[in-house]
Amino acid sequence: MAARQLGRGIALQSLYEWDFYGRKDNLEAILNRNLEEFAPGFNDHEFVLKILHGVSSKMKELDEVITVSAPEWPIEKLPVVDRNVLRIGLYELLYADRNEVPPRVAINEAIELAKNYGGINSGKFINGVLGTVYREIGEPDKKGSPSSRAEHATGQDKKQGANRKEPERQIP
């Protein structure tokens, strides 16, 4: 299992426990125990901490996005795994550095978490919700999308290489 995938799994386990017990315990203490127990050789603690701090600090905003994107599923009625997979996926999709975690990677990793830890239909549900949000934000990493054209025009497209200079283009 890739290091970051393992890190996301540990983050999910920690968020699950924290959420299950009413968010009363110290999330970092839960994380440290889970890292020690389930991933003793894991060395990218900063990545997992960034996810946990990001999700916990943006929880209200993330839950609002879930409520709007899945109106038939009130947040408190969602299975704890699905709810926290969505929070992780949405945090990475909406708030993470896109050079570090491209939007499609955020979605795919969340789907994998749902398949590994959730119920039989969790992967499809997560895919549907995150796909809806991805389209709502303008499909930022899709070639030809307004967001990718804007990134390209401002030189933020790292795929072109650091030394290659592209001519500036006007965004239609």
Image: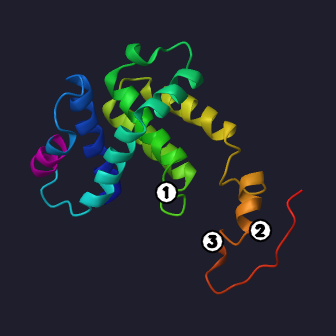
Q: Are marks 2 and 1 in contact (CB under 8 Å)?
A: no
Residue at 68 percent across and 36 percent down: it is 136
Instruction: Choose the circle earlier in sequence order: 2 or 3.
Output: 2
Instruction: Choose the circle earlier in sequence order: 2 or 1.
Output: 1
- Amino acid at circle 3: Lys
Name the foreground residue: 172 vs 118. Answer: 172
Quadrant of image for the N terminus: bottom left
Rendered location of residue 27, percent (x, y): 21, 39
When asked about the image quadrant of residue 166, the answer is bottom right
Q: Which residue is mark 2?
A: 153
Cα separation between marks 2 and 3: 13 Å
Magenta stretch contains residue 163: no
Residue at 24 percent across and 58 percent down: it is 45
Rendered location of residue 164, percent (x, y): 69, 85
Foreground mark, 2 or 3? 2
Residue at 62 percent across and 40 percent down: it is 134
Residue at 32 percent across and 23 percent down: it is 80
- Amino acid at circle 2: Ala
Q: Which residue is mark 3?
A: 159
Cα separation between marks 2 and 1: 20 Å
Q: Are marks 3 and 1 in contact (CB under 8 Å)?
A: no
- Amino acid at circle 1: Val
Magenta stretch contains residue 32: yes
Q: Which residues are magenta?
A: 30-38
Instruction: Choose the circle earlier in sequence order: 3 or 1.
Output: 1
Predominant secondary structure, magenta span: helix
Q: Give the secondary structure at mark 3.
A: helix
Quadrant of image for the C terminus: bottom right
For residue 99, side relative to residue 167 (left or right): left
Q: Give the secondary structure at mark 2.
A: helix
Q: Which residue is mark 1?
A: 101
Rendered location of residue 152, percent (x, y): 73, 67
